[in-house]
Image (tube, helix red, strand yellow):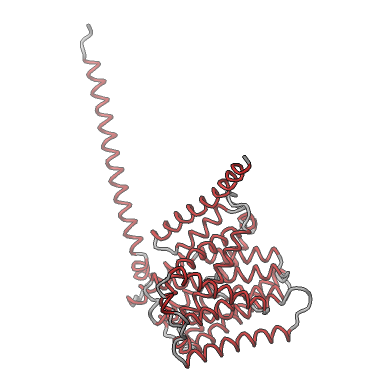
């Protein structure tokens, strides 16, 4: 009897999971059909089913654990796919742009903090949050424009990887903000050690060939062993890094670089990619669960104003920095727009700041809301990029021409819809007149019919 009750309880617990997965899949397919990033659908699924939505998922505790695993595996995967030679070629521009983004984000965060009456630690964390861009969203947008493998994609990916690497010292610094006064010397030593270790590893791997993995020929065709072994390396390095006082994602990233420069790289990537994709879906679902709809509704204008200010400032800043560091106008435009949103690691930084007490709850909710709005607005930026790209390629001179080209598809669809509505209305008028005429003739026939 007890066993049957427990089985029923387990079955009931699976219902919310099934609903969440089904809704996420449907919304993801819907956005994919609309030629938009599916991750927007995953976030909306979390919002709709989360604690402030339908309430099907009342707590995000277990989901958050899977989401953290997703971030660790994401950094591991980025490390595996990182081409050290290509990154070194774009390193100067990537570092200059990233540092410029961070300084400008700090200035914007200080303004927001002064208006909101926030502390200095909160201003620093807000600067970190605003400075990050979404690697996943930016790469998807560039892929939609067929620019990922071009010059704009190379420049943007270099800057995004530099940001992803910068997350590691950021998390170390944010973790040090809790528990009283900050030991600046210890924080500086950790950051220097992390950067030196990473730089030394990249320099060493850049001078030698592929690392030979023991027993590689025996396991290269064993999918289960490759998946389990790669995840063991990933989470083992993350655990060691966390115990050493560094960020777990730092260890995962270094492990990814090592695996990516080994003889098993081509075998491991297709095995790990599906696992990383599933955990990444859970990560974006957890973002939706974190969004407080009541907070957004109560502070709607503030959230929208800050979101628009951040998006506009980042767009102008990115294009300016890329132009100043040598990119041509069209490359700077496409790459700059692709990095205009706030990134997924901003959620990690916000959660880390909240957990150590460096970020207040109200500012945490504001940061989550603004980051989510910028990610959800990514389809608009995809459309803007396509239109601006068309306008630039056509060499248009007037606003009338620009609007005609930029919105040609919409104008065509509107004209088609207008013609279809006109045909429907005409048919309805014809049928209405036919019905009235038939009724008139029927009544006339009844009147003229001789009485018996």
> Considering only vertical position in the picture, is 325 above or below 416?
below
Q: Nearer the viewer, residue 127 or 399?
A: 127
Image position of 383 (left or right of 2)? left
> Considering only vertical position in the picture, is 294 above or below 152?
above
Q: Quadrant of residue 391?
A: bottom left
Residue at (69, 63) in percent of width and height: 362
> Considering only vertical position in the picture, is 429 above or below 242?
above
Q: Nearer the viewer, residue 85 or 422?
A: 85
Q: Quadrant of residue 360?
A: bottom right
Image position of 386 (left or right of 423)? right
Residue at (62, 57) in percent of width and height: 60
Asked whether the viewer can see residue 300, the reply is no
Asked whether the viewer can see residue 293, the reply is yes
- Residue 127 rendering spot, x and y as whole percentages: 63, 76
Judged from this view, the residue extending furthest toward the top is 452
Residue at (27, 33) in percent of width and height: 433
- Residue 337 rendering spot, x and y as whole percentages: 47, 74
Quadrant containing the N terminus in the rendered view: top right
Image position of 343 (left or right of 186)? left
Residue at (31, 43) in percent of width and height: 425
């Amino acid at each position: 009897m007890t066993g049957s009750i427990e089985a029923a309880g387990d079955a009931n617990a699976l219902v919310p999971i099934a609903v969440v997965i089904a809704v996420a899949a449907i919304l993801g397919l819907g956005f994919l059909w609309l030629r938009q990033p599916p991750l927007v659908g995953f976030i909306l699924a979390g919002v709709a089913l989360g604690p402030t939505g339908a309430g099907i998922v009342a707590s995000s505790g277990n989901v958050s654990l899977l989401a953290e695993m997703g971030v660790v595996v994401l950094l591991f995967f980025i490390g595996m796919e990182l081409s050290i030679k290509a990154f070194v070629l774009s390193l100067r521009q990537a570092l200059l742009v990233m540092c410029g983004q961070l300084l400008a984000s700090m200035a914007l965060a200080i303004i927001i903090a002064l208006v909101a009456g926030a502390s200095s630690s909160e201003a620093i964390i807000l600067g970190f949050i605003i400075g990050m861009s979404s690697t996943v969203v930016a790469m998807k947008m560039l892929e939609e424009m067929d620019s990922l493998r071009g010059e704009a994609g190379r420049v943007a990916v270099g800057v995004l990887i530099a940001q992803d690497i910068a997350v590691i010292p950021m998390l170390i610094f944010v973790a040090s903000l809790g528990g009283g006064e900050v030991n600046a010397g210890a924080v500086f030593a950790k950051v220097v050690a992390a950067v030196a270790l990473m730089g030394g590893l990249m320099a060493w791997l850049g001078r030698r060939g592929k690392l030979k993995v023991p027993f590689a020929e025996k396991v290269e065709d064993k999918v289960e062993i490759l998946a389990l072994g790669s995840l063991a390396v990933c989470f083992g390095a993350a655990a060691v890094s966390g115990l050493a006082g560094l960020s777990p994602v730092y260890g995962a990233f270094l492990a990814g670089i090592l695996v990516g420069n080994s003889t098993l790289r081509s075998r491991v990537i297709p095995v790990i990619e599906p696992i990383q994709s599933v955990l990444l879906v859970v990560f974006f679902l957890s973002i939706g669960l974190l969004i407080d709809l009541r907070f957004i509704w109560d502070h709607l204008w503030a959230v929208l104003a800050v979101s628009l200010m951040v998006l506009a400032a980042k767009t102008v800043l990115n294009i300016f920095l890329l132009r100043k560091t040598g990119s041509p106008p069209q490359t700077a435009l496409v790459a700059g727009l692709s990095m205009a949103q706030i990134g997924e690691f901003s959620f990690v930084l916000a959660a880390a700041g909240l957990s150590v007490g460096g970020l207040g709850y109200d500012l945490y909710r504001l940061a989550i809301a603004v980051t989510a709005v910028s990610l959800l607005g990514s389809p608009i930026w995809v459309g803007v990029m396509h239109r601006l790209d068309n306008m630039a390629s056509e060499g248009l001179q007037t606003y009338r021409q620009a609007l005609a080209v930029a919105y040609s598809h919409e104008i065509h669809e509107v004209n088609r819809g207008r013609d279809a509505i006109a045909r429907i209305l005409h048919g309805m008028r014809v049928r209405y007149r036919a019905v009235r005429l038939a009724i008139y003739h029927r009544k006339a026939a009844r009147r003229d019919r001789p009485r018996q």
